[in-house]
Image (cartoon, rainbow, N blue to C red):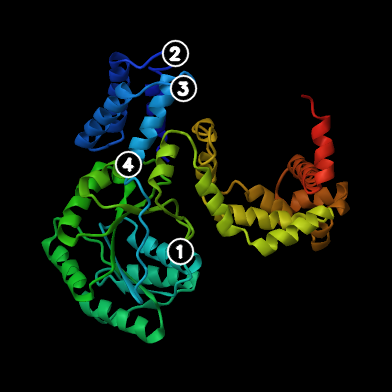
Amino acid sequence: MFENLSDKLDRAFKVLKGQGTITEINVAETMKEIRKALLDADVNYKTAKTFTDDVKQKAIGANVLTAVSPGQLLTKLMNDELAALMGGTTSELNVSASPTIILIAGLNGAGKTTFTGKLANFLKTQKNKKPLLVADDIYRPAAIDQLEVLGGQIGVPVYTNRDSKDPVAIAKEGIAQAKQNGNNVVIIDTAGRLAIDEAMMVEIEQVKAAINPHEILFVVDSMTGQDAVNTAKVFNDRLDFTGVVLTKLDGDTRGGAALSIKSVVNKPIKFIGTGEKMEAIDVFHPDRMASRILGMGDVVSLVERAQMQFDEKEAAELQKKIRKNKFDFNDFYNQIQQIKKMGNMKDLMGMIPGVGKMMKDVDVPDDAFKGIEAIINSMTKAEKENPDLINPSRRNRISKGSGRDIQEVNRLIKQFEDMRKVMKQMSNPAAMAAMMKRMPR
């Protein structure tokens, strides 16, 4: 996420490295490089100029403490200004009404239908809501099919009327069904449209006027950069939407949309999409995103994702097993599944301070655990529950069954055994204290 921009900003900061003080000359040179980096990332020209001018003025006027280098001070100023540029504070979705009506709008191919499913899943699992999806795309039957499939995956009902060609009537019917069935959130997936298509724009204006939604979310493909910002302005002029959703932030995005859209349309970014899975949706936090762009990680979001996947009761049971040295391959496999639900592995690593830069040229495939899973799935029930049973002949059988080299099987079992020893030590405070005393000082 934003790898190219992060690299270029890092190079720009190097201008100040080794400088004892901040001067108008060295700050001007750094700002020139930063403005170039922003423009290369497809940030709006006026936005980039205003941003760098503001940072420059604050940098020149700042008192540099002896414990803080000019480069560190500029990084802090950049972090604060980037966060402010993207909205400053987190903008929560308003779901206080019952039912709350949310209208989803955007261009063709922006990922509206997928996001609609993700939002329903988010509201159901994280906000304890009972959503209803409404398929209001009268032009593309495949969109209705897709929404029904997504609704089935996440256990959320979908209202459809394939015989109707009136999007206003379908939206009203969906809301009526939600009220009848006790659904407290209605998410209406509209047809993708072009901003230059007057008839289509009038149509969605009519839908808005008829249902008076509490939230209108404009979904935009972040990979389209400045074009996305221009389109957002046209849609905002017609719909006065309440928030923006940036999709496909897991791709090779340049960052222009995320950094420009708030300053151009003055509407907050509320959600970001970071993958195809239904769990791959995050509330947008400007301060955390600024830290990630500057390569400072985002530990808070990483912890929040972990908390979403790990059940406290299960964790307590696992802790008991670890203390008794009963942690087995079933437990290991379950932990892998929970980690996978947290999102794209490279994205997760990028949230750890310092690791993002180290991983920029490393390809971390989504199926990074595929080999481990194959080995564990080739074990018998008894072997999973009692790893000590796995002798050389069993290892050969597991190797053949999983299609992995015997060296890979041996390595996994060795790593598992080492991990189990460390986990047992960490669960015993006395053993940990003794180990700390033995460590060299």
The answer to which of marks 1 and 2 sits earlier in the sequence is 2
State the residue position of label 4. Answer: 84
Secondary structure type for disc 2 = loop
The answer to which of marks 4 and 3 sits earlier in the sequence is 3
Quadrant (top left, top right, bottom left, bottom right) of the N terminus: top left
Say which amino acid is labelled 2: Gly
Give how far apart the Cα atoms at labels 4 and 1 are.
Answer: 26 Å
Please identify the quarter of the rendering in which residue 133 is found. bottom left
Tag 1 near tag 2, CB within 8 Å: no
Say which amino acid is labelled 4: Ala
State the residue position of label 3. Answer: 68
Please identify the quarter of the rendering in which residue 135 is found. bottom left
On the image, the x and y values in percent for residue 293 come to 41, 36
Give how far apart the Cα atoms at labels 2 and 3 are.
Answer: 12 Å
On the image, the x and y values in percent for residue 433 come to 81, 39
**Residue at figure coordinates x 65%, y 61% from the top left:** 312
On the image, the x and y values in percent for residue 106 come to 26, 58
State the residue position of label 1. Answer: 122
Secondary structure type for disc 1 = helix
